[in-house]
Image (cartoon, rainbow, N blue to C red):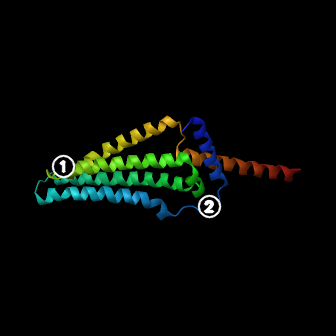
Amino acid sequence: MKQSEVREEVAMIVKAIKESDAEVPSFSEGMRPSLIYFCLVHLIMLVGMIPMVLFERRIDSNFYCSMYFFSVLFNLGFGSLIYSYHMQYLMIPEETRRKSRLLAMLREKVSHYAYFHFGILLTVSAYCLPDGMASLLPLVQIPLFFITVFVLLFDLGRFNLPSLAGLVDAAKDELKNKELQEFLNGVNKEER
């Protein structure tokens, strides 16, 4: 895409959000990707614990419990981040989401990086499963997350895009300014 096309798409998205009269997306609709992420990651980690228990290749249980606890907290935090961005994505009218090339490109890139993230987690888990070291997956998960996010932001940075949150906020600010101006115009007319 050319930068001029990106600017046109951004303007179209902001205008669509401003003019939209759609319902606010439901909580369950917004939570879907977060729940998928949370369940898949913890399923991979639970499968990684099987050899540790079966083959008695145990690590210090206090260390593992604390590592797993921080992993759950990290995944809850990351799940809330996924939820907030998905809700902002759902605030864009469906028709605009379908016809926007920019949003299609963003969806494709985010899905590719999500597949990369889960692919690495599965590969590390499968590689370490026979040795009983797959139970250490939470140690791999946090650096992998930062690497994935860094590469995704680096890739999307080429397009000089405002963030999705920026688009939604810009539309809200413009709408508030318009409503404020209409209110002030109404007050000025009443004073005359």
Three-letter code for the amino acid on which mark 2 is drawn? Ala
Q: Residue 24 placed where, x, y %?
A: 57, 61
Disc nearer the start of the sequence (2/1): 2
SS for callout 1:
helix
In the picture, the quarter occupied by the N terminus is: top right
Q: Give left or right: position of 91 versus 185.
A: left
Q: Is residue 63 visible?
A: no
Mark 1 Cα shell of 10 Å, populated few (<14), some (14-19), many (≥20) = some
Label 2 vs label 1: CA separation?
Answer: 48 Å
Camera-side residue of 79 and 118 = 118
Identify the residue under disc 2.
22
Three-letter code for the amino acid on which mark 1 is drawn? Cys
SS for callout 2:
loop
State whether residue 181 is above or below residue 94: above
Q: Residue, x 39% and y 51% (percent of image)?
A: 78
Q: Residue, x 15% and y 51% (percent of image)?
A: 60
Question: Which mark identifies residue 128?
Answer: 1
Q: Residue pushed farthest left?
A: 56
Q: Give left or right: position of 54 versus 126.
A: left
Q: Residue 117 placed where, x, y %?
A: 34, 47
Q: Residue 113 placed where, x, y %?
A: 39, 46
